[in-house]
Image: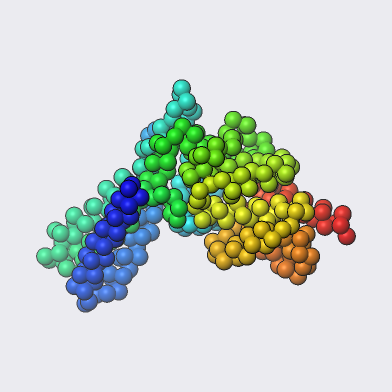
C-alpha cells in the first residue's frame, strides 16, 4: 500500500510539473533560449544548494566535513587540508559526505542531516518564484526566467522528499525511512558515514574498527542500508585477504536478498566474478553475471568492474587481449580515485591477480 502511495505521489508531482512547464514554455516563445538556459542553470543550482543543505544541517547536528561534490568536481578535506579533485559516484550528480557524531546510548541524529538538502534547497528555490510574480507585469522575460529557474529547481528537489522502495532509485527520504525502520539500518547508516570518514583519513578497510562491520540478518536484506553494510564487509575481507569468506558474503546477499538496488547488485556481481576468477571457481553462473554486467553502463566506469573483468579474462578465460584492455581501463580509473587508502586497496587486488598469473605461467 505504501509503495502504491509513493508511486501515485511521484506521478502527481511529475504530472503537475510537466503541465505547468508546458504552459510556461508555450507562453515564452519569444525568448526560448533564455528559458532553456534558466532551466539548465536551475539544475546546477538545485544540486549545489541541496548538497549545501546537507552540509549546513550536518554541522548543526554535530557532523564533520569530509567532501562536497557537484557533478565530478569534488572538494575534499584530507589530513586537515582542503583540495579539489575529480571523482564520481554512479547514479548521483552531487554528494556531501560528513563524518557522524559519536553515538550516545546507541543513538545519533540522522533525520536533519538527510532532510537538510530538501529543506534548504526548497526554501531557496521559492525565492525566485516569489520574485517572478512581482517582476512579471513590468519585466516579463526576466520574471518568466526567474519562475522557470525556481520552479524546475523546486520540483526536482521535491522528488527527494518522496521515499522510494529502494528497488530502482534511492533518495534522502528513502535513507530516512530505511533508518527509521530498524536499529540495524540506523547502525548501518552510521557505519557508512564513519567508513567514509576513516577512508578520507587514509585508513584502509582492513585497519578500520571491527565494530563498524557486521553481516546483516537475511530477513533485513530488503533494506538498502543493510545491503551496503554487507558490501563493506565483502571489501574488508578482501582487504584482509580472506577471499573465501568474501565470496561467502557475496553469495549470502545475492541468494537471500528479496531484491537489490541495481547498482549494488552490479557491485556484488562484479565481486562475485572477481572472487570466482581469483579462487579458480569459474562457473556458468559467473559467465551469466559477467554477461549481465556488460549491459550496465554506470558500472563500466567503476574500478571494481574493470578489476573483475581483468581477473575474468586473465585467470578464467585466458584471453590476454581482453585482459590487457581491462587492466588498462582499470589503471586509468585508478588515477581518479580521490583517497590513497582506496587506491592502496585496488593496487593490492591487482597484485593478487598479477601474482596468480606469474605462478601459473
Please determine whether, in this image, residue 277 is positioned above or below residue 246: below
Give the color scheme: rainbow, by chain, secondary structure or one colour: rainbow
Q: Which of 29 and 283 is in front in this view?
A: 283
Question: At 35% from the left edge and 50% from the top edge, which residue is drawn?
Answer: 3
Residue 340 at x, y percent in the picture = 65, 46
Q: Nearer the viewer, residue 145 or 199?
A: 199
Does residue 334 appear in this view? no
The image quadrant that residue 63 belongs to is top left
Residue 178 at x, y percent in the picture = 42, 41
The image quadrant that residue 213 belongs to is top right
Question: At 53% from the left edge and 47% from the top edge, which residue is drawn?
Answer: 257
Please determine whether, in this image, residue 143 is positioned above or below residue 95: below
Residue at the bottom extreme of this rendering: 30
> Quadrant where the C terminus lies?
bottom right
Does residue 208 appear in this view? yes
Residue 54 left/right relative to 357: left
Q: Nearer the viewer, residue 353 or 95?
A: 353
Q: Nearer the viewer, residue 281 or 142?
A: 281
Residue 242 at x, y percent in the picture = 73, 41
Residue 325 left/right relative to 41: right
Question: At 67% from the left edge and 38% from the top edge, which residue is drawn?
Answer: 206
Residue 243 at x, y percent in the picture = 72, 45
Amino acid at each position: 500500500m505504501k509503495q502504491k502511495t509513493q508511486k501515485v505521489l511521484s506521478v502527481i508531482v511529475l504530472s503537475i510539473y510537466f503541465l505547468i512547464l508546458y504552459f510556461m514554455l508555450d507562453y515564452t516563445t519569444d525568448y526560448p533560449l533564455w528559458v532553456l538556459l534558466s532551466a539548465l542553470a536551475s539544475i546546477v543550482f538545485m544540486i549545489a544548494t541541496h548538497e549545501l543543505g546537507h552540509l549546513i544541517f550536518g554541522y548543526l547536528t554535530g557532523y564533520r566535513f569530509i567532501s562536497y561534490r557537484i557533478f565530478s568536481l569534488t572538494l575534499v578535506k584530507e589530513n586537515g587540508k582542503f583540495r579539489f579533485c575529480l571523482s564520481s559516484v554512479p547514479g548521483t550528480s552531487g554528494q556531501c559526505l560528513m563524518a557522524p557524531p559519536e553515538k550516545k546510548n546507541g543513538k545519533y541524529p540522522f533525520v536533519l542531516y538527510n532532510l537538510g538538502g530538501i529543506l534548504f534547497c526548497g526554501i531557496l528555490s521559492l525565492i525566485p518564484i516569489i520574485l517572478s510574480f512581482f517582476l512579471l507585469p513590468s519585466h516579463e522575460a526576466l520574471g518568466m526566467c526567474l519562475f522557470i529557474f525556481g520552479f524546475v529547481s523546486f520540483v526536482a528537489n521535491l522528488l527527494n522528499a518522496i521515499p522510494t522502495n529502494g528497488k530502482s532509485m534511492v533518495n534522502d527520504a528513502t535513507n530516512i525511512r530505511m533508518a527509521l525502520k530498524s536499529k540495524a539500518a540506523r547502525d548501518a547508516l552510521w557505519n557508512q558515514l564513519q567508513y567514509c570518514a576513516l577512508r578520507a583519513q587514509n585508513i584502509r578497510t582492513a585497519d578500520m574498527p571491527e565494530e563498524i562491520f557486521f553481516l546483516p540478518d537475511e530477513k533485513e536484506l530488503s533494506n538498502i542500508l543493510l545491503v551496503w553494510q554487507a558490501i563493506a564487509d565483502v571489501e574488508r575481507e578482501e582487504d584482509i585477504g580472506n577471499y573465501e569468506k568474501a565470496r561467502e558474503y557475496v553469495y549470502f546477499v545475492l541468494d537471500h536478498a528479496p531484491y537489490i538496488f541495481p547498482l549494488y547488485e552490479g557491485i556484488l556481481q562484479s565481486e562475485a566474478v572477481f572472487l570466482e576468477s581469483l579462487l579458480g571457481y569459474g562457473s556458468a553462473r559467473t559467465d551469466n553475471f559477467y554477461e549481465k554486467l556488460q549491459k550496465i553502463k554506470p558500472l563500466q566506469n567503476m574500478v571494481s568492474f574493470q578489476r573483475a573483468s581483468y581477473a575474468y579474462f586473465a585467470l578464467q578465460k585466458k584471453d590476454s587481449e581482453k585482459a590487457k584492455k581491462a587492466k588498462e581501463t582499470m589503471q586509468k580509473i585508478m588515477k581518479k580515485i580521490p583517497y590513497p587508502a582506496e587506491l592502496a586497496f585496488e593496487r593490492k587486488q591487482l597484485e593478487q591477480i598479477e601474482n596468480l598469473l606469474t605462478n601459473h605461467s
